[in-house]
Amino acid sequence: MTGTKKQRIDALAESTVDKPEDSGVSLAASAWRRLRRNPAFLVGAVITVLFVAVALISPWLAPHDPAARDLADQVVKARNEIPPAQPGHPLGGDPQGRDFLSRLLVGSQQTLMVGVFATLIGLAGGLVLGTLAGALGGWVDSVVMRAVDVMLSVPSLLLAVSISALFARPSQFTVIIAVAIVQIPIFARLLRGSMLAQRGSDHVLAARSLGVRPGAIVFRHMLPNSLGPVIVQATLVLATSIIDAAALSFLGLGNPDDSVPEWGQMLGGSQQVIDSHPALSFWPAGCIIVVALGFTLIGESLRDALDPKNRR
Amino acid sequence: MLRYVVRRLLQLVVVILVLSLLLFAWLRSLPGGPVSALLGERATEESRRALTAQLGLDQPIFVQYFRFLGRALSGDFGNSTGVAPGSTAMEVFSQRFPATIELSVLAIIIAVLLGIPLGYLAARRRGGWFDNLSVIGSLIGVAVPVFFLAFLLKYLFAVQLGWLPSAGRQTSGIDATRVTGFFVLDGIMTQEWDAALDALLHLILPAMALATIPFAVIFRITRAAVLDVLDEDYVRTAESKGLTTPVVRRRHVLRNAMLPVVTTIGLQTGALLAGAVLTERVFGYPGVGEALAIGFERRDYPVLQLLIIIAAMVYVLVNLLVDVSYALIDPRIRTR
């Protein structure tokens, strides 16, 4: 965990590359054995399972339609009045008079979508670039890596801001794209690092001397062995992408259409009224913090479990 | 070593040049543009065209870029069109840069003064309640959206309790003498103690918000590094040859554990700008981060170009410094 951002990525890439000669137990099996005993992993897993479950069943869980302005008659814009908690609406309403609890519950769906899609797109981009650079080497490697360096030279939030500014109309889609692109160089560098670390390793040498085609070596031997660090990073990115999406909403670059709620958008949009109605910020913030913590706990314990130094 | 530094500096020049070209094309492909931002939606076609020509935006993009490069070499980065119309981009930078530096330095000081001792203590009491509690705390610190934390601090300490000012760098009534642009330093140099104290009070809340993530990271790195070192053979050797515990801790554990911590501090300093964009926005703090946020809203090309390029340069240079210091401290790295 030391050195520059680049070195940290590279170190993660090397540290979790499977070295088959280590022992008779497969890395996955021994990692799983350690994970099961790790309380941090268990807490993270419980949070994540709950989050995904709520997201899946929230349309049936929510007492009201999150887009319906049931309490609109209690909203007084001029006096900054927002419907308070009342029977049937335990958390009251939002500034538009919609049931806040329902929005919070249903908001988990879009939040999960932002996290998952931003991670998948970042991962896909990084996989392509990283595999190209790591497998082909030479000038392809140089070109890809210089491009990655340029992207890494800009602080990540600034990069996300400049990407989302590119779209005339911000939407959920532009938020996901902006957050995802920021992750591409990190995944690319990570994958390239662990591919390079394997190039000279015995199992690749063995495959090559057996006459396995280069394509098959890359996809059947090198890529599967490089996935450990990528999975760790992906779990951590699930957390950061949800937080980054909230930051974009706060800066006015989020999805302006709030008929389908999302926690980051709810949090970013409620900052103007935080002095008078702090609960409108606290609830979505609390949800984001807990979910981000859950993903981070899983990611960190995966990293520990996959680290060959910890194998016993 | 020298050759390595020179090679890295040359790489830096290439990265910055490529970045400046990409940034230039990128900004100009953004929807809207400074003309709409300056004149509004209802301006006549004629006045739009006149302003476009006046800003040089009617030229082909490569002409614009090389004109920009030529002027930039003589220190002219153009005039601000949105953040502070009437000033040059360089003036915007030189007014706001000290503000952000002041904020970042205080944030890093807070993060270091809390992160290193707590990380060391946590490692010494590994597995105890203090260790577990502070590890959980540091994980939550990374999971909290920075801007929300900033609002929380502002709400609690400025709005509810009224202990600290909620916005700006200096109370408007105070007539302080400006020397360096660093308000706290200015107050101390001119011995205007009330002005220095006032500026410092304005810094506390934004610095605390900005310090959270670096604090969490420095804490965790310190803890991990101390744990690593405690396992080392030379610590056992030192203990077994009868050295007292304080001596072992000071000379062998802390000194060796500080290597990764020092580099982490450097890196976190480089990455502070992203957090500053959010924190400065919440506190209406007139620094580089706020200028970037406003610059994007109003499509202020010259200011954005200058600030982003400088941000990238600082970031890459800090990375280089970290690499160099690493190689200087740890001889094993030099041979790579």
Image (spheres, rainbow, N blue to C red):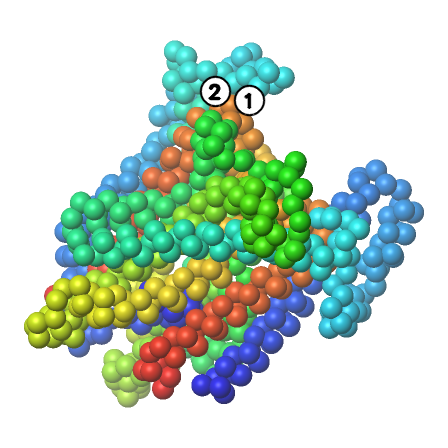
- Chain at tag 2: A
Q: Residue shown at 57%/19% (left/top)?
A: A80
Q: Are marks 1 and 2 in contact (CB under 8 Å)?
A: yes
Q: Residue shown at 44%/18% (left/top)?
A: A92
Q: Is residue B320 left or right of residue A12?
A: right
Q: Residues within 10 Å of mark 2 (few under 14, many from 20)?
A: many
How many labels were placed on the picture?
2
- Quadrant where the N terminus of chain B sits is bottom left
**Mark 2 residue type:** Gly
The front one of B316 and A198 is: B316
Q: Residue furthest right?
A: B46
The front one of B239 and A229 is: B239
Q: What is the spatial separation of the Cα atoms under label 1 and label 2, in whole angstroms?
A: 7 Å
Q: Residue furthest front?
A: B191
Q: Which secondary structure lies at badge 1?
A: loop
Query: Which percent across, then down, holds residue A243?
Result: 44, 45
Residue B37 seen in the figure: yes
- Chain at tag 1: A
Q: Is residue A117 left or right of residue B120?
A: right
Q: Residue shown at 41%/24% (left/top)?
A: A101
Q: Which secondary structure lies at badge 2?
A: loop
| Labelled disc at residue A96 | 1
Query: Which percent across, then down, holds residue A94?
Result: 50, 23
Q: Is residue A205 left or right of residue A172?
A: left
Q: Residues within 10 Å of mark 1 (few under 14, many from 20)?
A: many
- Which residue has dot 2 on it? A93
